[in-house]
Structures are given as C-alpha cells and as structure tokens.
C-alpha cells in the first residue's frame, strides 16, 4: 500500500520515487526556466506562464504541472525573497555611492576650512563632514578615536566645542590637534 501511494504521489509531485530517480518528465532546466518566466513576464500566473514558455521557448509544460510547482516549491515566497535581495542589493549600492559622494563633499569642505577659505566653519557642517567621512570608511584619524563633536543628550547644543576659537575648530576639523 505504501509503495502504491509513493508511486502515485511521487510521480504526481515530480519528487524522487523509491529508487531515487525523478519521475517527472520535465528537466530541471525547464523547471528553473518556468520559475523565471512565471516570476517575471508570466506575472505569477501559471496559465500565462505555460503560454509564454510554449511561444517564446518552445517548452511545453501543462498548466497543472506549473500550478503544482508553484505550490510545492513555494514560488510566491521565493519570488518575494528574490525581489528583496534585488532591492536590498540596489539600495546598498546606492547608499554606498551616496556616502562616498557625501564624503567627497565633506573632504572639500574640510579643505576649505583648513586652507582658510572658510574663516568661520559651521559646527554642524563639521559634524556632518565627520559623520559622512566615518560612514564612508574614512574613520577618525585621531589616536583616541573619539568623535570630533559630542552632542548633549536631549539638547541641541555642542558641548565640547564651547570656548574654542575658529582656528582651533579648523585644527580639529583637519585632525592636526587632539582635543
């Protein structure tokens, strides 16, 4: 009885039978192609996918087989995860490019401060420059690795720059002196 059920359901599901041989008449490559067509141009529709496979690729896979694969192989979840990986990859790449661009702007600002082109550097722009450089992989150059600016919790003012001259601010921004 167990062999009869295994033979029926093994063949119906395309899984390995009792001898470890696939009972599906479809190749793994066809199944992979079917998933890609279903996920993209097939609009996650088994009927449309069957038609597109036949018309564009000359591969005949019945609707019922595709519908079974959609369920058995969890294609909707797989497609969702594939989309997340793609989006995450693009977001990460865009973020990295933006951070490098921000670091470029930050370094230009710091050059203007250190060259004297900006005589009164803006404290918040200095903090933004520090953060941009740090996030882009250009961490603190000071031996203590302490942040350049420290904000009071719950307050908007900067605590450790109070009383510093513009020249001292410029030196801090360039990393030529320690606090």
Image: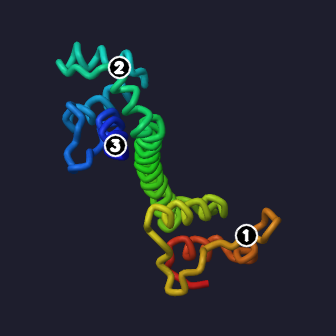
Q: Is residue 148 above or below residue 112?
A: below
Q: For the residues labelled 2 and 1, say whether their Cβ atoms are less than 8 Å apart.
A: no
Q: CA distance from mark 1 to mark 3?
A: 68 Å
The disc, 1 or 3, on the residue closer to the chain's N-terminal end is 3
Q: Nearer the viewer, mark 2 or mark 1?
A: 2
Residue under the image location 48 percent in, 53 percent down: 102
Residue at the disc numbered 2: 63
Nearer to me, 17 or 102: 17
Residue under the image location 50 percent in, 77 percent down: 175
Please give the label number shown on residue 29. none
Q: Secondary structure at mark 3?
A: helix
Q: Position of residue 100 (x, y in %)?
A: 42, 55
Q: Secondary structure at mark 1?
A: loop
Residue under the image location 23 percent in, 16 percent down: 54
Please give the label number shown on residue 151. 1
In the rendered structure, the answer to whether residue 132 lies left or right of residue 61 reads: right
Q: Quadrant of residue 52?
A: top left
The disc, 2 or 1, on the residue closer to the chain's N-terminal end is 2
In the rendered structure, the answer to whether residue 128 lies left or right of residue 8 reads: right
Q: CA distance from mark 2 to mark 1?
A: 63 Å
Q: Position of residue 71 (x, y in %)?
A: 44, 34
Q: Position of residue 86 (x, y in %)?
A: 40, 42
Residue neighbourhood size for the residue with mark 1, other residues' Cα within 10 Å, grouped as few (<14), some (14–19), many (≥20): some
Q: For the residues labelled 2 and 3, say whether their Cβ atoms are less than 8 Å apart.
A: no
Nearer to me, 107 or 118: 107
In the rendered structure, the answer to whether residue 85 lies left or right of residue 162 reads: left
Please give the label number shown on residue 6. 3
Q: Position of residue 109 (x, y in %)?
A: 51, 58
Q: Secondary structure at mark 2?
A: helix
The disc, 2 or 3, on the residue closer to the chain's N-terminal end is 3
């Amino acid at each position: 009885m167990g062999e009869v059920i295994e033979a029926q359901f093994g063949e119906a599901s395309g899984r390995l039978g009792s001898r470890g041989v696939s009972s599906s008449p479809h190749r793994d490559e066809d199944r992979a192609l079917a998933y890609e067509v279903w996920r993209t141009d097939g609009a996650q529709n088994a009927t449309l996918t069957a038609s597109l496979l036949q018309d564009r690729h000359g591969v005949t896979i019945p609707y019922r087989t595709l519908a079974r694969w959609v369920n058995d192989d969890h294609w909707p979840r797989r497609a969702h995860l594939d989309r997340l990986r793609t989006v995450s990859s693009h977001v990460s790449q865009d973020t990295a490019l933006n951070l490098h661009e921000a670091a470029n702007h930050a370094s230009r600002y710091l050059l203007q401060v250190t060259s004297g082109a900006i005589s009164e550097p803006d404290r918040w722009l200095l903090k933004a420059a520090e953060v941009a450089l740090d996030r882009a992989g250009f961490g603190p150059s000071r031996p203590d690795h302490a942040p350049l600016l420290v904000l009071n919790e719950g307050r908007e003012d900067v605590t450790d720059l109070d009383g510093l001259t513009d020249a001292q601010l410029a030196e801090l921004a360039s990393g030529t002196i320690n606090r």
